[in-house]
Amino acid sequence: MWEQAATKLTAGPHGLEPALVARVQRERILEAMAATVAELGYQQLTIGKLLGRAGISKLTFYELFDSKEQCFAAAYDESIAQAFERIESACAAEALAPAEQRLGATIDALLEFFSEEPAVARMCVVEVLAAGPAGRERRAATMDRLATMMEGLLAEVRPDLGPIAARALVGGAEEVVFGAIDRGQTAELPQLAAEIADTQLKLIRG
Amino acid sequence: MWPQSDVKLTGGPHGLAPEVVREIQRERLLKATVEVVSQKGYAATTVRDLLGASGLSRRTYYDLYGDKEACYLDAFAEIARQVEERIGTAVGRGADGRERMRLALEALVDFCVEEPRAACACLVESLAAGQPGRSVRAALIERIATTLGPVLSELRPNDPNPDLTGRATVGGVFELLYGPLARQDVARLRELREQIGELPTVLPTSA
């Protein structure tokens, strides 16, 4: 996530276009948002701590974002968009495979992404629920999307299972993933993905 | 939930023993905590809100609890105890594994229908109460999963990962309850009751 954050912006005229400078600064802030929220928790997050970590001035922050809440929302939205892109790529690669395989590919892609980005994982899965009503809404929308995907997969294998079963399966997986991330065990997520897929397939197929 | 909270404590000597007064005040405060936290959310709840809702003085509050978090965790513990008791009782009935699971899950939903504010304070707001809130919630899920363990292994004897299945089962049901509890949508909880009860029937397809 936010690879441009590492681009060097030396003091004085950068010789870089203002738009590029702004983009680098924005990514630096978003990366710092994920790192700071993951480390301190949303409740303890302040703009001061965020800016300290990002190495950005308050003036620059407010040129790019309205508030800490809006900054969090942007960091969350971009991370989740990336997660879904990874899922969609994985499913596209398995487009002709049976639904069971696509289920495994989906869980693998998502958890691999989280294992590569532990701060993002904590922000998106754990801290989002401490980020007030806006956080809860975002999380609900993400869960809705995942539940809809699950419904689509179930429709091919168990058309008798409807949206409630789909949401229960997604929710159960989320609970297990939440626990691993909360305990700082993101390195184990790829292995956990295999166990979750296995458990879900047995629940679905018997 | 807290039957003693309504007992009248008029100004001046109550004629009640101090420990009794203290317990009544504590229940009043825990009840108020549930009311405020379920309405405003944990983060936005202040000690002043709790004082207003409970009618207690600041001094009495701080005699009872050091801070908002300690007070909330005590309320959580009491609610969790009630939830577990209901599930534990339900799982003891039922003619077979499927029915025991159904009764257990329905008991959980029934608690949410009967005590929507307490259920919200417990299942929803714990996730907004920092690491301590998350920890007690995780421990509750673990204990419920353990209670359901024997029933689940009866339904799924060859499960290579029964712990994961247990946590996923409880977590899945909690997820279904989350939205309606956050919105205090009791009608929706009633609608969900039957479908949640059915999940153990439709999901593990092996006999």
Image (cartoon, helix red, strand yellow):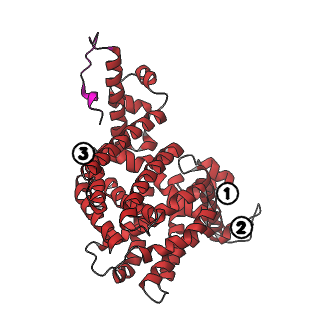
Q: Which mark is residue A116?
A: 3
Judged from the image, the secondary structure of the residue bearing numbered disc 1 is helix
Residue B20 seen anywhere in this rendered image of the structure: yes
Give the magenta part as a residue range.
A1-17
Disc 2: host chain: B
Horizontally, residue B36 falls left or right of residue A145, namely right
Percent position of residue A75, x then y: 39, 37
Categorize mark 1 by other alpha carbons within 10 Å: few (<14), some (14-19), many (20+): many
**Amino acid type for the residue under numbered disc 3:** Glu
Query: Closer to the camera: disc 1 or disc 3?
Result: 3
Categorize mark 3 by other alpha carbons within 10 Å: few (<14), some (14-19), many (20+): some
Horizontally, residue A101 falls left or right of residue B37, namely left
Percent position of residue B54, x then y: 67, 57
**Amino acid type for the residue under numbered disc 2:** Asp
Disc 1: host chain: B
Query: Closer to the camera: disc 2 or disc 3?
Result: 3
Quadrant (top left/top right/bottom left/bottom right) for the C terminus of chain B: bottom left
Judged from the image, the secondary structure of the residue bearing numbered disc 3 is helix
Name the residue carrying label 2. B6
Percent position of residue A135, x then y: 48, 45
Disc 3: host chain: A
Any magenta on residue B106? no
Q: How many marks can you see?
A: 3
Residue in view at x 33 percent, y 39 percent:
A35
**Amino acid type for the residue under numbered disc 1:** Ser
CA–CA distance in space, label 2 to label 1: 11 Å
Quadrant (top left/top right/bottom left/bottom right) for the N terminus of chain B: bottom right
Horizontally, residue B42 falls left or right of residue B144, namely right
- Front residue of B159/A28: it is B159
